[in-house]
């Protein structure tokens, strides 16, 4: 494979992208910094096909990333391969308002091949190629220039290894007829709504014990205010105000701005400064959270009850057994919410009752809930058994 020197000019990047536009797939990785910013600061992009690989410096003066972004989000003929690519996809979305498509994530694919739910990149490379990844540059400050040869080699290795692993992984998926299992998961990864950072939904990330509509309404208003402040200032949310502070204020709101100076987690200056004024203004306009937005308590899910909760536990046990038997990550077969909905009597709209999931797990799950399946111990192992088989 040909490894290019670091690409720092628009002409070289355009020529590279013109060649890669004819490839069947490209492997992609990014290096970024986000400790001190709201928006990830893109510092390096690595890309490869089966013939060539390069690292691109997006911080190079005057470089035009247009051809690269066009390849990633508009060229439907080239498959984009990532490993645990959520943050890489987020960066592309922030730059373009679109996500890479079509997309393939080797971490997700590993779930279908019995390698666990979140296999790390180093373990993936070791298991498929027998190569120990050099971890020496993991904590590089990628925003500093110049980058030395070791840093660049380390970064490019991420996509060159991936370009060798992907065809092997694809071949195994085809042999085991599990490729179709991944379509839904890959489309979910590419869904732009996952990366939109909607300020009106920011409150859902903050833990708070209260379930009062007034408190949650204030939490929503404060979280929205903080999200907008963080975006406008390009600062991490926690630099504006920590989650605990937001939750405390939502539960015990100050009457006036001068009271902010006594709130734990805020400095005394908030009693009179502009940002404190904007926080108080957000509180003043907070309305109780509407009933249709109220979070559902785990112990009050409709129709579940104590007996239903026990049935859900049996379904989770069944899921573990089936995942073990077919050597696939349990999370790929079914999610906990779907199991609880099935136990509560729901049948419509559940992914585990459609397609390949129904064939591999859903049919047995339904039979368990409806009394046609039970458990037995055989040779020290827990097995699924048809109830008619254990009748006297």
Image (spheres, grey):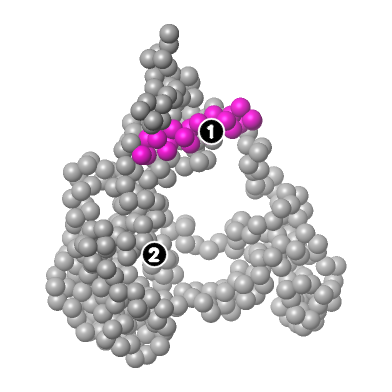
Which residue in the rendered view is the most extreme toward the top?
392
Q: Can you give x and y, in whole percent of width and height, for residue 82 in the image?
A: 31, 62
Q: Is residue 341 above or below residue 274?
A: above
Residue at the image point whose x is 61% and y is 27% from the top: 307
Which residue in the rendered view is the most extreme toward the front?
379
Q: Is residue 137 visible?
A: yes
Give the mark count.
2
Read off the residue under disc 1. Answer: 312
Residue at the image point whose x is 52% and y is 40% from the top: 337
- Dividing the picture into quadrants, the one containing residue 264 is bottom right
Q: Is residue 258 left or right of residue 169?
A: right
Crowding around mark 1 (Cα neighbors within 10 Å: few <14, some 14 to 19, many 20+) is many
Sequence-wise, which precedes: disc 2 or disc 1?
2
Q: Nearer the viewer, mark 2 or mark 1?
A: 1
Q: Please name the predominant secondary structure of the magenta segment in the image.
A: helix
Read off the residue under disc 2. Answer: 89
């Amino acid at each position: 494979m040909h490894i290019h020197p670091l690409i720092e000019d628009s002409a070289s990047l355009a020529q590279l992208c013109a060649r890669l536009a004819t490839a069947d797939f490209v492997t992609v990785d990014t290096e970024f910094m986000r400790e001190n910013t709201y928006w990830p600061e893109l510092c390096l992009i690595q890309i490869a096909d089966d013939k060539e690989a390069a690292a691109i410096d997006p911080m190079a003066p005057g470089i035009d990333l247009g051809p690269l972004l066009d390849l990633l989000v508009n060229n439907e003929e080239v498959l984009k391969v990532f490993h645990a690519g959520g943050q890489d996809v987020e960066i592309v979305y922030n730059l373009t308002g679109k996500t890479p498509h079509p997309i393939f994530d080797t971490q997700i694919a590993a779930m279908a091949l019995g390698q666990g739910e979140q296999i790390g990149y180093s373990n993936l490379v070791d298991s498929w190629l027998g190569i120990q990844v050099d971890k020496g540059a993991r904590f590089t400050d990628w925003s500093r220039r110049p980058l030395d040869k070791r840093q660049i080699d380390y970064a490019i290795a991420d996509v060159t290894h991936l370009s060798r692993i992907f065809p092997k992984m694809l071949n195994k998926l085809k042999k085991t007829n599990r490729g179709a299992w991944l379509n839904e998961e890959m489309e979910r990864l590419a869904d732009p709504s996952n990366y939109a950072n909607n300020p009106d939904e920011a409150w859902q990330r903050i833990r708070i014990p209260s379930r009062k509509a007034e408190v949650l309404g204030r939490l929503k208003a404060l979280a929205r205010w903080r999200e907008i402040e963080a975006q406008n200032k390009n600062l991490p949310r926690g630099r504006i105000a920590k989650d605990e502070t937001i939750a405390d204020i939502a539960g015990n709101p100050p009457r006036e701005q001068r009271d902010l100076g006594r709130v734990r987690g805020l400095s005394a200056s908030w009693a009179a400064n502009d940002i404190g004024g904007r926080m108080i203004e957000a509180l003043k306009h907070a309305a109780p959270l509407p009933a249709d937005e109220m979070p559902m308590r785990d112990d009050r899910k409709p129709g579940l009850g104590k007996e239903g909760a026990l049935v859900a536990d049996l379904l989770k046990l069944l899921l573990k057994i089936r995942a073990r038997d077919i050597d696939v990550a349990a999370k790929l077969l079914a999610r906990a919410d779907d199991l609880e909905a099935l136990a509560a009597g729901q049948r419509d709209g559940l992914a585990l009752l459609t397609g390949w999931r129904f064939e591999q797990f859903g049919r047995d799950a339904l039979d368990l809930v409806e009394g046609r399946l039970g458990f037995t111990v055989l040779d020290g192992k827990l097995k699924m058994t048809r109830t008619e088989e254990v009748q006297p």
